[in-house]
Amino acid sequence: MKRVSKIFLVMVLFLTFALTLGACEKNKVSHKLEKDVTIRVYSWWDPAHQGIVSLKEGFEEKYSDYNVKLEFVKISSYYKTMLTKLAGAKLAGGGGEAIDVMMLAFDKLPLFAQNDAIMALDDYAEEKYLDDLYPSVKEGLYFEGKLYALARDVTTWATILNTDMFTEHGIALPNEDWTMEEFINICNQFAAKGVAGYAFNNYTDLLSPWVYLYGGSYYDAENNVSTINSDEAITGLTALYRLIQSGGSLSNAQTLEYGSQADAFVQDRAAMVFGGLSEVNNIENKGGHYTVLPLPKGVNGHQSHTFTNCWTVPSVSTKPAWAWKVIEYFSGAEGQAIAVEAGMGLPATPKANIDAWKNETGKEFRKYFVDALGYENTKPYSTDTFGPNWDTNFKVMMADRIFDKPGLTDQQVKEEIIAINNLLTYYLQGGV
């Protein structure tokens, strides 16, 4: 495990100790709203960002009768710093720095929830609000059957295609109902022209379509078991390896020679990449010419996955009722529309009015990212308490032992995946 992960776990242990000391002092949840209060909101976003400013103004206007003010605090080295602050606040018995609302990526929810660092929100949430969420988003807000967060923004994945390369090499663009078989065929058409059809950053979220589009999964969080040894996952990961060997895809190492998958794309070294809206913006900012289509259809038809940044209420919050009102507004239809218009991500609910944004001239492709939220088989990205350990070791071992290692047979790829899977189960269960 990397040194930063070890430091992170030490901070978690310290936080657990502090929270345990204060567990007996917890008061029953109060829903009373006081007047003339200031709520401190912690995130990694710049408080001057237009989206944050608009959320602040919208909330304060809505509750103007209460004279409630929001104070946004941007934190660097976010998770390490927040763990320290939370532990300090608990040890201070509520007399230290106020931490009322905190932003978390949802893959960190299990760790913070299990260590009692954030509050369960079931006593506050109404079923109607929860039922209005996209199912894949709603599912990702829970840990062990309890609601621990509301959505700040959501990411789905689609395919970004280099229109210059398709034109230059005389290869027809596919339609939106294309399949993985067609995708691989197109990649190999580019290989025949001497260029790659695909490139990838070696990140677990970007690689996950190669597993779930073939019917597999990364791991079983309930039983803490890695599952890339399934026939379905092995088929998908082997298909990617074969594509690399045929020249239809750059390897991880080859992609890094250009800087990233986006750099390979804009340098006309790869015709397609998978990514979210942020990757589209990244490619556009680098001067790339592109169009967007849904991910190719897999064994379950159209499918994507969701990754959600969340708003949570720390267990040390002294104003939990107001903290709830803040995140309820931020995550509701009005707040989500503000966030989307400000370029902060996709909405958690179809109730958000984002028609103008979705139909902006020249940006009609945004519909594919929004549509992916509602696919029947779209699921939240896999998370678990030790999920970050799994992620780190997966990408290192897959690159070193498979993707960047030429000449393997399908049987050797399978054997390597099974061996890697055994180690990943160990890491998923807390091994170091």
Image: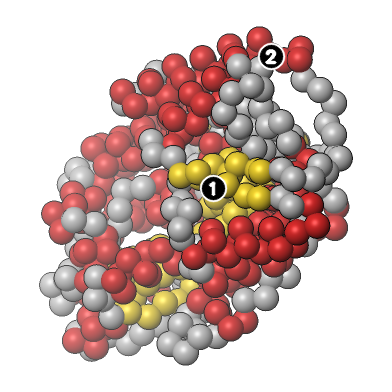
**In this orientation, which residue lies closer to the viewer: 316 or 142?**
316
Q: Tell me the tag on residue 72.
A: 1
Occupied quadrant, residue 41: top right
**Residue 148 x, y percent position in the rendering:** 69, 39
In-front residue for pair 80/319: 319
Q: Which quarter of the rendered picture does the C terminus lie within? A: top left
Relative to 80, does residue 46 appear above or below in the rendering? below
Contact, mark 2 vs mark 1 (Cβ under 8 Å) = no
User: Image quadrant for the N terminus?
Assistant: top left
Asked which secondary structure carries label 1, the reply is strand
Q: How many marks?
A: 2
Q: Nearer the viewer, residue 182 or 267?
A: 267
The one nearer the camera, 201 or 19, is 19
Residue at the spot 59% in from the left edge and 23% down from the top edge: 96
Instruction: Give me the residue at 61% from left, 58% from top.
Output: 56
The answer to whether residue 350 shows anywhere in this view is no
